[in-house]
Image (cartoon, helix red, strand yellow):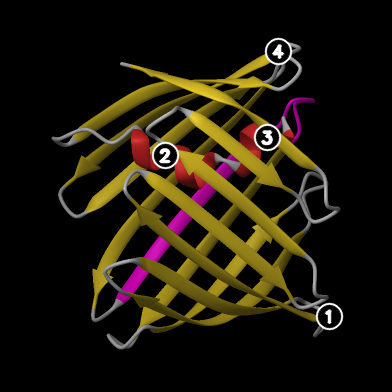
């Protein structure tokens, strides 16, 4: 499931079609020949949108994620997210996000874990966008005051998209998504690289 989970942001872009309802399926084939799938459905109602995704790994185990995003005005957005894991455990979160119109944003997120415990998290970050790509810098403060930060840089050129995330401990996660040849390569924080192909249907 690791490759499937990591590629979600990039692969979601390829599923978008015109209109209020968007759906698609992506099949990933790893270097060992095993396959997994991502099924996605997105709907927009007025200013809100919902996204539902179902991940199936090579063993047939599934994980589902549902998310709703609702702008409330004055640069504020509320989010809800729920996840049903492969072993049946559930997690959920609610968040309130505020932007200042200049790329700076803050978020207050309450996350409930599989044991039913709810903890607050504070997020502070900055986003920027150019013709060639996007950057996102964020710091997350947990319930005990511990912090972690990351810097994410993404770009697309001639059908090839690259993403690099650098964490505060110096580790990195990179991905290359080639829409011309339907291939991907992912290097995780432990340095392991996975490669493969994908096929989009619907």
Q: Earlier in the sequence, mark 2 or mark 1?
A: 2
Which mark identifies residue 3? 3
Q: Position of residue 79 (x, y in %)?
A: 44, 58
Q: Nearer the viewer, mark 3 or mark 4?
A: 4
State the separation of the CA atoms marked 4 and 2: 22 Å
Horizontally, residue 48 falls left or right of residue 161, namely left
Horizontally, residue 185 falls left or right of residue 183, namely right
Residue 87 in the magenta stretch? The answer is: yes
Magenta segment, principal secondary structure?
strand
Q: Nearer the viewer, mark 1 or mark 3?
A: 3
State the separation of the CA atoms marked 2 and 1: 33 Å
Q: Quadrant of the N terminus?
A: top right
Check if mark 3's residue and mark 4's residue have beta carbons within 8 Å. no
**SS at circle 2:** helix
Q: Which residues are magenta?
A: 76-89
Q: Which residue is mark 4?
A: 33
Q: Which residue is mark 1?
A: 144
Q: Earlier in the sequence, mark 3 or mark 4?
A: 3
State the separation of the CA atoms marked 1 and 4: 43 Å
Check if mark 1's residue and mark 3's residue have beta carbons within 8 Å. no
Which mark identifies residue 12? 2
Horizontally, residue 190 falls left or right of residue 140, namely right
Q: Position of residue 3 (x, y in %)?
A: 68, 35
């Amino acid at each position: 499931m690791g490759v499937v989970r990591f590629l979600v942001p990039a692969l979601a872009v390829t599923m978008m079609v015109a209109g209020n309802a968007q759906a698609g399926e992506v099949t990933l084939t790893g270097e060992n020949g095993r396959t997994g799938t991502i099924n996605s459905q997105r709907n927009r109602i007025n200013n809100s949108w919902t996204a539902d995704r179902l991940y199936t790994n090579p063993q047939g185990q599934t994980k589902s994620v549902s998310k709703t995003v609702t702008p409330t005005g004055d640069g504020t957005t509320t989010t809800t997210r729920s996840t049903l894991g492969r072993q049946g455990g559930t997690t959920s979160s609610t968040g309130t996000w505020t932007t200042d119109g200049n790329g700076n944003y803050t978020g207050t997120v309450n996350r409930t874990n599989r044991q039913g415990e709810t903890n607050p998290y504070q997020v502070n970050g900055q986003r920027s966008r150019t013709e060639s790509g996007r950057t996102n810098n964020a710091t997350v403060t947990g319930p005990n005051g511990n912090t972690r930060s990351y810097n994410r840089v993404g770009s697309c050129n001639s059908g090839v998209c690259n993403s690099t995330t650098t964490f505060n401990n110096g580790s990195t996660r990179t991905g290359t998504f080639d829409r011309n040849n339907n291939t991907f390569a992912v290097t995780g924080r432990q340095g392991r690289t996975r490669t493969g192909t994908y096929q989009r249907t619907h």
